[in-house]
């Protein structure tokens, strides 16, 4: 556990200041109790006693003190498996479990003392209890201790859920699922991970999705972010049908989904299911940056192979795609598959339609009179009509998910389209090419060493970015047209003045340049806030706090060329400014150009007219040329100009190293 995690887990000792801009549970698939092996996937008929009452006499032969002594002799409390099962982490302050729910521990000091918790667990599992079956509560702990101590508990045959799991004979597969980032949601812009558990009796979309998330109904963005960052939410594991998550991610949020089939054997999967059961209704404090959904999900895999150390090696933050890389590097993944979102599917279909077909799709989706009748009587070929109907059905579902129809309007229109489509026997294949796998993209953090000249004065600069991706980085594996930057810091050394300065601290820099098409017209937008040195008048560089927002549209001229324009608002704070503030509207325009696979160019101009404070016009022009050598390295060249009664120019070049 990092120092950062320790500070946040001990809020009564440390105060962490922060400023931010507004931005019945089931743990395994329900396997039915059975009575005939030929119809249900169990090895044998399960004979559970009709009464859950267990005789105290069955425990007379068990010497609990001897079992505890044996566990101490074998130092089971210090094993990787025990630490994984209890989510223990070492820090400079000692050992601590990252589970925060007191009911997860049996010893009074179990959260901090693995040895004490192990002894209490053995005593609990092998002692007589009149009203409870302890295996029901701690299946994974029992499964491991039974093997290590070579001693079964009399409770085992009386635990129905335990017997169902160990008797299940059908082949079970587990997949790690990665819905790609959703840039319009602060909690989802980095993506998300969850697990699915499936067998021949609940395959594919019918499988069960295991998810970890903060328990909150908060809708106010800044409060949600603050509470999520500082651990004021409780995180729980939950389960639901996978098709519901696919509908949420793929249809409602337009997120592509990657599925990684894990090569776990049946014994490992069984232990994972036992551990999920142990975490039923058990909470851990949720932290957006590190102890988040992806980090906690790693424990479910780490308990199956504690030598993998999946939860080690993270410090201040855990980004979902980095956990995917960790799982792949540890040898857990046997295959990968891609599930496109509805938006991706529509965009692919649109490319195969001519302008007349697109007009017809629009008229059908708008529920125009006689649109479907006109299609039937049109001169389109049968293939073209099928293409129109297929695209229209997808587009209608997309619009309904975006609440553009009432339920009755949607049902009437969608059913009519399907009726007409069923009259055409022809089936078309819409094979969507797989984009690059997310893990093939560049690593999430980077450091850049660069040098340059500002207003004829040389400087050197060190740039550190904790996360995540900008528009000139290699886009493979990232949301197309997205830029998500948190905490990028530039320290500059001015050779003339021999001074070390904070040149820039970008708290948030998010841009979404999603191209429009004839059917779907997403809004392009940006939010940038932080500290930056800007050349104002005779003062060469003034450190100001800035807020810059904007929205507009992006057009894709070719696959390798996009242009965009936005209407913007900009505000600056500094005590050297008139009234300490400058604020006003502006406009911007720019383009993204990728002439070759690893070569990216971005150029833009921003014209801001400050109306509050000292009235002035401020013009910014910038061109970035970047060559991405690999997922580890890139080279960058920048040219910038600012005009505010006087022209200032800056050029720089640097080398970037990516890591996580």
Image (spheres, rainbow, N blue to C red):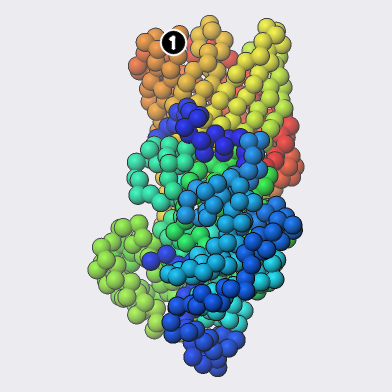
For label 1, the SS is loop
Residue 69 location, quadrant: bottom right
Which residue: 24% across, 68% down? Answer: 408
Quick one: 25 or 620, which is closer to the camera?
A: 25
Which residue: 67% across, 47% down? Answer: 312
Quick one: 524 or 291, which is closer to the camera?
A: 291
Which residue: 57% across, 37% down? Answer: 6
Total tally of numbered discs in the picture = 1
Which percent across, then down, holds residue 613?
37, 13
Quick one: 138 or 32, which is closer to the camera?
A: 138
Which residue: 52% across, 48% down? Answer: 108
Which percent across, then down, holds residue 549?
42, 32
Which percent across, then down, holds residue 322?
64, 49
- Whether residue 15 is visible: yes
The image shows residue 353, relative to residue 589, as above or below, that is below
**Residue ID for mark 1:** 575
Quick one: 336 or 271, which is closer to the camera?
A: 271
Which percent across, then down, holds residue 206?
48, 74
Residue 431 location, quadrant: bottom right
The image shows residue 648, relative to residue 124, as above or below, that is above
Q: Residues within 10 Å of mark 1 (few under 14, many from 20)?
A: few
The image shows residue 385, relative to residue 620, as above or below, that is below
Quarter of the picture containing the N terminus is: top right
- Whether residue 299 is visible: no
Quarter of the picture containing the C terminus is: top right
As drawn, is 90 to the left or to the right of 514?
right
As drawn, is 526 to the left or to the right of 82?
left
């Amino acid at each position: 556990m990092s120092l950062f995690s320790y500070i946040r887990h001990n809020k009564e000792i440390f105060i962490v200041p922060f400023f931010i801009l507004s931005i019945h549970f089931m743990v395994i698939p329900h396997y039915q109790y059975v009575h005939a092996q030929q119809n249900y996937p169990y090895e044998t008929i399960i004979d559970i006693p009709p009464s859950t009452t267990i005789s105290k006499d069955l425990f007379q032969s068990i010497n609990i003190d001897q079992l505890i002594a044996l566990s101490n002799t074998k130092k089971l409390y210090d094993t990787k498996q025990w630490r994984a099962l209890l989510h223990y982490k070492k820090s400079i302050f000692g050992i601590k479990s990252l589970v925060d729910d007191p009911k997860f521990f049996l010893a009074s000091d179990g959260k901090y003392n693995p040895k004490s918790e192990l002894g209490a667990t053995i005593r609990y599992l092998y002692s007589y209890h009149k009203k409870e079956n302890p295996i029901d509560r701690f299946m994974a702990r029992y499964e491991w201790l039974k093997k290590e101590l070579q001693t079964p508990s009399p409770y085992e045959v009386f635990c129905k859920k335990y017997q169902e799991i160990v008797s299940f004979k059908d082949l079970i597969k587990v997949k790690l699922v990665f819905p790609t980032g959703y840039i319009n949601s602060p909690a989802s812009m980095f993506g998300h991970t969850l697990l699915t558990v499936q067998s021949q009796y609940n395959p594919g979309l019918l499988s069960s999705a295991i998810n970890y998330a903060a328990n909150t109904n908060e809708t106010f963005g800044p409060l949600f972010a603050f509470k999520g960052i500082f651990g004021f939410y409780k995180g729980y594991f939950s389960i639901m049908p996978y098709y519901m998550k696919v509908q949420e991610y793929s249809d409602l949020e337009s997120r592509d989904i990657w599925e990684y089939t894990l090569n776990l054997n049946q014994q490992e999967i069984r232990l994972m299911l036992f551990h999920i059961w142990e975490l039923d209704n058990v909470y851990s404090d949720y932290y957006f940056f590190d102890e988040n959904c992806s980090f906690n999900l790693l424990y479910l895999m780490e308990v199956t192979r504690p030598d993998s150390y999946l939860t080690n090696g993270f410090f201040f933050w855990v980004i979902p795609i980095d956990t995917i890389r960790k799982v792949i590097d540890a040898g857990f993944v046997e295959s990968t598959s891609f599930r496109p979102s509805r938006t991706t599917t529509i965009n692919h279909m649109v490319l195969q339609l001519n302008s007349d077909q697109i007009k017809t799709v629009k008229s059908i989706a708008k529920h125009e009179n006689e649109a479907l009748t006109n299609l039937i009587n049109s001169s389109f070929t049968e293939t073209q009509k099928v293409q129109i109907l297929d695209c229209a059905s997808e587009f209608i579902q997309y619009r309904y998910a975006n609440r553009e129809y009432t339920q009755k309007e949607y049902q009437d229109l969608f059913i009519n389209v399907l009726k007409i489509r069923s009259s055409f026997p022809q089936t078309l294949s819409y094979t969507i090419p797989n984009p690059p796998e997310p893990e093939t993209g560049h690593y999430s953090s980077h450091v850049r060493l660069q040098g340059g000249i500002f207003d004829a004065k040389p400087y050197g600069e060190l740039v550190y970015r904790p996360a995540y991706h900008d528009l000139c980085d290699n886009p493979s594996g990232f949301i197309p047209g997205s830029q998500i930057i948190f905490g990028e810091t530039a320290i500059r050394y001015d050779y003339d003045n021999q001074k070390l300065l904070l040149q820039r601290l970008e708290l948030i820099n998010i841009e979404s340049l999603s191209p429009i098409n004839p059917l779907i017209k997403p809004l392009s937008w940006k939010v940038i806030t932080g500290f930056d040195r800007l050349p104002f008048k005779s003062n060469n560089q003034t450190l100001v706090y800035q807020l810059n927002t904007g929205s507009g549209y992006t057009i894709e001229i070719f696959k390798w060329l996009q242009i965009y324009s936005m209407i913007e608002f900009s505000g600056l704070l500094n005590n050297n400014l008139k009234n300490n503030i400058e604020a006003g509207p502006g406009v911007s325009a720019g383009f993204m150009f990728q002439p070759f696979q690893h070569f990216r160019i971005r150029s833009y101009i921003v014209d801001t007219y400050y109306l509050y404070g000292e009235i002035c016009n401020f013009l910014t022009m910038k061109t970035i040329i970047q060559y991405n050598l690999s997922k580890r390295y890139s080279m960058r060249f920048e040219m910038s100009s600012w005009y505010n009664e006087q022209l200032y120019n800056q050029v720089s070049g640097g080398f970037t190293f990516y890591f996580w």
